[in-house]
Image (cartoon, rainbow, N blue to C red):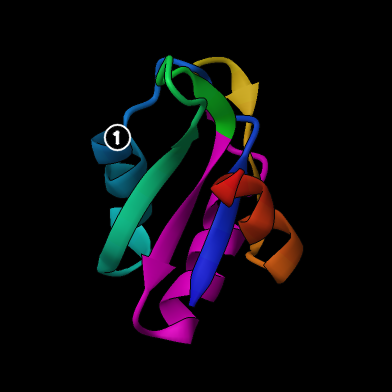
Amino acid sequence: MRIYVGNLSDKITDAQLHDLALPFGKPDSANIARELPSGTSKGFGFVEFRKAEEAHAAIAGLDGKKVHGQALNVIEATELNTRLWRR
C-alpha cells in the first residue's frame, strides 16, 4: 500500500523519508517527487509498504507531525496524487 506524504521541507531526502516511516513498519520504498531537470523537491513524496496495516499506522503516526518546522499531511495515495508525482 502506498501513502502520500505532503508538505515536506525541501531539505528532506529519500533516505530521511524512509527513516520517518520505519517506526511503523518496513517500507519497501520512499521517494520524494522532484522537478526535472533541476531535481528540486516538489514538497511531497510517497512511501510504499507491503502490509496495509503498517501503512495505516504510518498515516496515523505521521499525519500532522512536524518535521523541519512543517506539519506533514499524510494520506493513502490515490490515482490523482500519484499522477501528480509522474508529471
Count all numbered tags in the image, as a single digit. 1
Q: Residue at x 67, y 41 (%)?
A: 64
What percent of the width, then of the height, locates residue 56? Answer: 55, 73
59 relative to 66, above or below: below
Pick the front one: 69 or 14: 14
Mark 1: few/some/many CA within 10 Å (<14, 14-19, 20+): some
28 relative to 7, above or below: below
Q: Is residue 63 magenta?
A: yes
Pick the front one: 10 or 79: 79
Kind of residue indicated by mark 1: Gln
67 relative to 32, above or below: above
Q: Residue at x 41, y 15 (%)?
A: 11
Q: Residue at x 43, y 20 (%)?
A: 37
What percent of the width, then of the height, locates residue 46? Answer: 48, 53
Residue 67 can be seen in this image: no
Quarter occupied by the C terminus: top right
Pick the front one: 76 or 78: 78
Q: Give the magenta part as a residue range.
A: 44-66
What percent of the width, then of the height, locates residue 77? Answer: 63, 65
Residue 28 can be seen in this image: yes
Q: Residue at x 49, y 62 (%)?
A: 58
* 16 relative position to 33: left or right: left
* 11 relative position to 2: left or right: left
Residue furthest to the front: 37
Q: Is residue 59 magenta?
A: yes
Q: Secondary structure at mark 1?
A: helix
What percent of the width, then of the height, locates residue 26? Answer: 25, 68
Pick the front one: 41 or 26: 41
User: Residue 71 appears in which quarter of the rendering?
Assistant: top right
Residue that mark 1 sits on? 16
